[in-house]
Image (cartoon, rainbow, N blue to C red):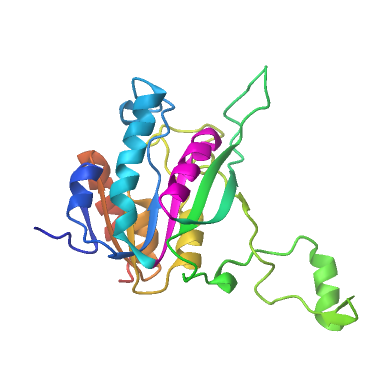
Amino acid sequence: MLKVETNKLYVMDCFKFLKLVPEEFVDLIIIDPPYNMKKDKWDKFNSTEDFFKFTNSYLDMLIPKLKVTGSFYIFNSPFNCAFILKYLLDKGLTFQNWITWDKRDGLSAAKRKYTSSQETILFLTRSHKYTFNVDDVRIPYDSLERIEHAKKKGILKNDKRWYPHPKGKLCTDVWHFSSERHKNKINGKTPKLPHATPKPLDLIERIIKASSNPGDLVLDCFVGIGTTAVAAKGLGRNFIGCDINPEYIKIANQRLKMIKNE
């Protein structure tokens, strides 16, 4: 059987690609698969039943590729993730977080329910032994004035003096990242992007920093225009990935060439 090369992206559907990946081969999986929201032709299914049949099929192939010490992140809608989480738990994965991504997008304008401005990221692991670099993903404290005071004299908590961590507070499970649509505005207008649903680079970098170490291998079998691969390379990790669209892979490879550090 042929084997995938690391630090290479393949023009291939996820099922053919995953057949080439050995079991217990990767340290971290990050995927942004179809949501069945009709965003593009790759995101259209005849029915909800067909969508979950497709989803469960690639999950069955994907899970064994993860090392016992590995971590798994999957993006999707909150509704879909309710079913995906149950399926992954039944397959033996260990739940860690239901992460809410506040997109700060403002795209939707629902009039008969609350306007949606979030996506879900599920974080699971294959075991209780996994990488989590907590200090690498700390975030700024909310009250800078109070923190400046605490740096000098501390804050009394339970009869002990608490001093702020120099890297910030612990990262929560609610993430605030603007969508790529809004990050790339030109004269106040959102341009048409080469991919319908690209994820922010800084968001993917947070996942990679937290759940892998330099030299680890990151897999993405719905690579799109290569954001996960670009983030992995930039952070000194290895990557493998695929997408069925050759134009996406072409763009991804162009982006990878711009990353200097190997």
Quadrant housing residue 54: top left
Above or below 231: residue 91? above
Please state, as top left, top right, bottom left or bottom right, where the C terminus lies in the image.
bottom left
Quick one: 158 or 203, which is closer to the camera? 158
Asked whether, in this view, residue 20 is left or right of residue 241, the answer is left
Quadrant housing residue 45: top left
Q: Residue at x 35, y 70 (%)?
A: 216
Q: Which residues are magenta?
A: 69-92
Q: Residue at x 38, y 41 (%)?
A: 33
Asked whether, in this view, residue 160 is left or right of residue 174, the answer is right
Specify the farthest residue to the left: 1
Quick one: 260 or 16, which is closer to the camera? 16
Quick one: 203 or 87, which is closer to the camera? 87
- Residue 88 magenta-highlighted: yes
Specify the farthest residue to the top: 112
Residue 29 on image: x %, y %: 38, 57
Question: Taking the image as drawn, is residue 81 in sight?
Answer: yes
Residue 206 on image: x %, y %: 51, 61
- Residue 12 magenta-highlighted: no
Residue 18 on image: x %, y %: 23, 51
Asked whether, in this view, residue 230 is left or right of residue 243, the answer is right
Q: Residue at x 38, y 21 (%)?
A: 47
Please state, as top left, top right, bottom left or bottom right, where the N terminus lies in the image.
bottom left
Residue 184 on image: x %, y %: 49, 42
How many marks the image carries: the answer is 0
Question: Taking the image as drawn, is residue 258 in sight?
Answer: no
